[in-house]
Amino acid sequence: MTETLLSLRGLTKAYPGVVANSNVSFDIGVGEIHALLGENGAGKSTLVKMIYGLVKPDSGTMVLRGKPFAPAEPRSARADGIAMVFQHFSLFDALNVAENIALGMETPPPMRDLARRIREVSEAYGLPLDPFRTVGDLSAGERQRVEIIRCLLQDPKLLIMDEPTSVLTPQEVQILFETLRKLSSEGTAILYISHKLEEIRSLCDHATVLRLGKNVGECVPRETSASEMAELMVGSALKTPQRAGRELGEVALDISGLSAASPSAFGTALKNVHLTVRKGEVLGIGGVAGNGQDELLGVLSGEILTAPDAVRLDGAPVGQMGPTARRKLGLLTAPEERLGHSAAPDMSLTENAMLTGSVRENLERNGFLKWGAAEDFARRIIEAFDVRTPGPDNAARSLSGGNLQKFVIGREVLQKPQVLVVNQPTWGVDASAASAIRQAILDLAAGGAAVVCISQDLDELMEISDRFAALNEGRLSTPRDAAGLTVEEIGLMMGGAHGMEVAHV
Amino acid sequence: MIVLEKRPQPSREWALATPLVAVLATMIVGGLLFGALGTNPLVAIRTIFWDPLFGEFAFYYRPQLLVKGAPLVLIAIGLSLGFKAGIWNIGAEGQYIIGALVGAGIGLAFYPLDAWYVFPLMVIGGAVGGWAWAMIPALLKVRFGTNEILVSLMLVYVAEQLLASMSLGLLKNPEGHGFPGSRNLADYPSATSWINQDVGLHWGVAFALIAVIFAYVLLNRHMLGFHIRLTGDAPRAARFAGVNPARLILFCLGASGALAGLAGLFEISGPAGQVSIDFNIGYGFTAIIVAFLGRLHPVGILLAGALMALTYIGGEIAQSQLGLPAAAIQVFQGMLLFFLLALDLLTNFRVRMRKSEVA
């Protein structure tokens, strides 16, 4: 390694009830692409927030270019050459690119000069961007470019990127990596946070692995296999979901010519969607977030009503049925948003078991609720899906994201659905819980249920799907057999690089 | 520096303790207020909280507690159903008036017939009247998305004008020598809600207790009550569970209107006796305080209604005996709601002292 840029020594940060970082130390060299690897909740975000001055460490020191470094706020971190691209963008849709960038500056130059500099920087790094386009019209990949260029204008020495590829198609990821490699060759260090192992292997020079807030190992990703890194991350060997060979049955779910407006002003309308899923089959639906995933789930759960025969369950039209009637017929769903959509945050797990279980688990009689039976059902979910909680009386919001997700998926799986639709089943869930959830989905399909899995995690979809389709601006591509699909083909189904051009540098 | 920290789940202890702490805080700050007005705070607090129950004239005041408490509890139970689901009926006062007018109108139409069915018909009329008045904001909200807070509140003033018109016109007592106001229903045996006037017992008291039990069963044991709670906690989850929001709005506003209408009917055919311009005295608004003071829980509302009735009676005694202004008593009641809502924070947050750090 060359000269050290930033070195962290014994950083510790505790929040009430949880130690987010405990005695974390590592060095980042000048121009190095350093990966920070770990499961959700391993303490990656807290660590970079300390570097960026958003959080003050309880103890430990940082040294930047040989001088002690303790930023009190992001402004002073930026003054020292540290920039950060957050996972969630902070851009105003109604303003154009240059205006958005000017808003983040202490002393913005005149708009014309700024626009010229944006053009220069964007072309120099292969990220073409028109400074006068309205941000609301940009794709997720282009919005990320705005954030990156905003950082590059500060001429940073260290660029922190928090899960930058979660919103990108494979082609967009390649463009981004080119840019990052060029930056690195010019001496800008990059701290790259991710849990996607293959990306880290192709991009990063060095990796630090965090588990439960502790630095549990370092490695050179190019020389380490993905499974070795996964073991470091999780602390034990990961079980890959097993799929049993199975016979496909008749068509269980049939959607034809489905168009539906979104109930939300910023949603995406579904346009002429066709799909069929057979018994025992898993259909994976990929796509970048916001391309109609929520709407597709709503149309299937019964929250959005459609023409009666646009949605057919075992041949029977169900488009005009509400959620309860569909559950009775065996069509169960699990939405993406856990708190507030698939579960009520302030209600107990027993009450949340009642939420969707009342019909199929026989938890009510003439409208009167059988709380004893609901509690038994909640206990069965907790046991079967290894939900870590003191008991079914605890509020849903007291569970960690992964545990609540196991509860929500378990609640639907245990009701023995004919058709199960899940949206982002393992979003924000640690690797071992994610593999348990995928296994449950596969087992369900092996038992003869039809499964639709909507997800943005392509690795997940490739792992469990028999057929694959992608949503792009409310349209669904024609489903294709998942076996043998290449990453390029998947990217094209997802809409390629969303028409983004690549400047060759 | 004082920091607030969100609790992982709401504290059950604080949920029960806040009403008591709020009452105590109100006594202390209210006492200071009375002191500033030149009254001995201890005497004022004793007059308000002790004298109505155990003072020299308690035999007179105790029945009054039932008379004041019953309509408050009856209305507050209805309101609490909607409030739990995030449906804000602020116009119970109007539904109370209309229920009273319809019920009284039926009773007066039968005058002087002596039949067992007159009073039951009036009860049905009272409930239907309040229900219909509440259906106006409900239907407007479901159909056009209007704000039920504004519509229900404005309809209170419409109802008050109707009340004035009725007591001066259609329902005026033909033998009343031209004075405004109807015949006295309390003197019409087939139409009175009194069961035993000496102990303050009328049908409204019985209905209030029935409503408490009914609401308790509904909220804890029935799917509809579960859906009401679910809608209040997470509206999207409620839709996902299969709740039809429009039906829930119609039910909650309708039920609270019907109960407010019943309260009005029992009041007008008993304690108030006649349709008069100043028949309504703000029960519909005070019931909002009662509903929150009782944590929107049926049993809590029963206790809160009793407490509120106590401050009403005690406040009147304090006005007449200590010469405290009526406004001071209203401030005192308002303080109770203020402290309750402020202290509510403690159920979801805990307060921690932290040394301030030099940034």
Image (spheres, rainbow, N blue to C red):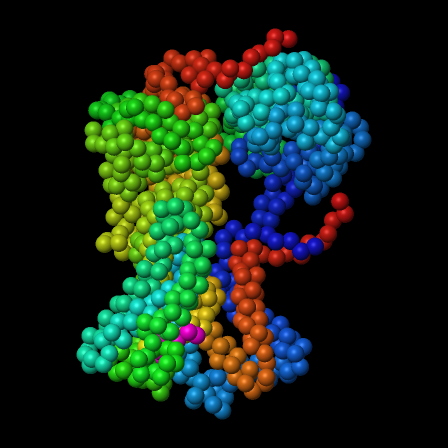
Task: Answer above or below: position of A163 versus A492.
Answer: below
Residue B212 falls left or right of residue A238: left
Question: Which image quarter: residue A273?
Answer: top left
Magenta includes B273? yes
Question: Which image quarter: residue B129?
Answer: bottom left
- Which residue ends up furthest to the bottom in the rendered image? B56
Q: Position of residue A209 (x, y in %)?
A: 59, 29
Residue A233 falls left or right of residue A218: left
Residue B86 falls left or right of residue A501: left
Q: Position of residue B258 (x, y in %)?
A: 33, 63
The quadrant of the image that shows the C terminus of chain B is top right
Query: Foreground residue, A125 or B98?
Result: B98
Q: Position of residue B231 (x, y in %)?
A: 40, 50
- Which residue ends up furthest to the right in the rendered image? A67
Q: Residue at x 54, y 18 (%)?
A: A173
Task: Answer above or below: position of B293 versus A194.
Answer: below
Q: Position of residue B108 (x, y in %)?
A: 27, 75
Q: Main secondary structure of the magenta part?
A: loop
Magenta includes B30? no
Q: Residue at x 27, y 36 (%)?
A: A320
Task: Answer above or below: position of B228 versus A404.
Answer: below
Q: Is residue B139 visible?
A: yes
Q: Residue at x 20, y 32 (%)?
A: A316
Question: Which image quarter: residue A309?
Answer: top left
For the magenta stretch, what is the residue range? B272-278
- Which residue ends up furthest to the front in the rendered image? B178
The quadrant of the image that shows the N terminus of chain B is bottom right
Query: Foreground residue, B29 or A96?
Result: A96
Query: Foreground residue, A52 or A300?
Result: A300
Q: Residue at x 46, y 76 (%)?
A: B309
Task: Answer above or below: position of B171 versus A307.
Answer: below
